[in-house]
């Protein structure tokens, strides 16, 4: 994946589950909704649009799956129409029960301050997503990390 001028965010985590299970967790909204968004319009499919919804924030987003290599890689485009970025997941099996997941969000636009803000928010967000996925897949725990990141009543 091309990352121009180092304008990208990166989050990585070891998840102690087989690569097929970890990969499915990110393409199947029935699983992903346990640690990230609350609902998805369907499984990710290459060259198809999918709607992801975070009901707690009253927010939905359309994502387009650009690359889907089973148990290896997912690449999506997402964001506001004038600020589309790429998100790439790379799944590296370390053995039959351990998968290292790397998520890179790239293609940020704007002045330096705006890009720094986008990189910081993306890194934080995807770190929470990976931590939530790890807790759910390894221990069947729903930590509500994304839900609790912006609790009602706080500005």
Image (spheres, rainbow, N blue to C red):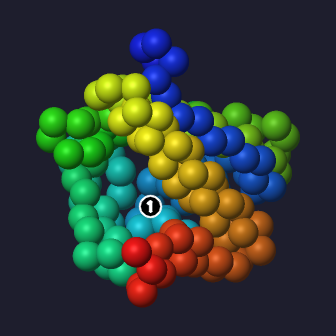
* Left or right: 58, with 122 as reference point: left
**Residue 41 in the figure: left or right of residue 24:** left
For label 1, the SS is loop
Q: Position of residue 112 (x, y in %)?
A: 40, 26
Asked if residue 63 is positioned above or below residue 141 in the image, the reply reads above
Q: Can residue 34 be seen in this view?
A: no
Is 127 placed above or below 2 here?
below
Residue that mark 1 sits on: 28
Q: Which residue is drawn at 52% across and 54% down?
A: 125
* Residue furthest out toward the left: 81
- Examine the image and state in which quarter residue 80 appears: top left
The residue under the point 44% across, 41% down is 117
**Residue at figure coordinates x 53%, y 71% from the top left:** 149
Position of the C terminus by quadrant: bottom left
Q: Position of residue 138 (x, y in %)?
A: 76, 67
140 with respect to 46 (left or right): right
Position in image of residue 120 (x %, y %): 52, 43
Q: Residue at x 42, y 41 (%)?
A: 118
103 lies above or below 6: below
Instruction: Depth check: give the residue in front, 58 or 27.
Output: 58
Whether residue 91 sits left or right of residue 25 in the image: it is right
**Residue 153 visible to the viewer:** yes
Up/down of 54 relative to 105, above or below: below
Which residue in the rendered view is the most extreme toward the bottom? 153
Neighbour tally class for label 1: few under 14, some 14-19, many 20 plus, Cα within 10 Å: some
Q: How many labels does the image show?
A: 1
The image quadrant of residue 99 is top right
């Amino acid at each position: 994946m091309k990352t121009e001028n180092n304008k990208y965010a990166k989050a990585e985590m070891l998840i102690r589950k087989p690569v097929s299970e970890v990969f499915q967790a990110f393409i199947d909204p029935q699983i992903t909704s346990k640690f990230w968004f609350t609902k998805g319009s369907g499984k990710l499919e290459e060259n198809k649009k999918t709607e992801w919804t975070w009901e707690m924030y009253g927010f939905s987003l359309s994502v387009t799956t650009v690359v889907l290599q089973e148990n290896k890689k997912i690449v999506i485009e997402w964001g506001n129409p004038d600020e589309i970025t790429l998100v790439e997941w790379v799944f590296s099996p370390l053995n039959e029960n351990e998968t290292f997941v790397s998520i890179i969000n790239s293609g940020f636009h704007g002045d330096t301050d705006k890009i720094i803000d986008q990189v910081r928010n993306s890194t934080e967000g995807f770190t929470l997503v990976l931590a939530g996925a790890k807790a759910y897949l390894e221990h069947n725990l729903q930590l509500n990390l994304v839900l609790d990141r912006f609790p009602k009543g706080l500005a």
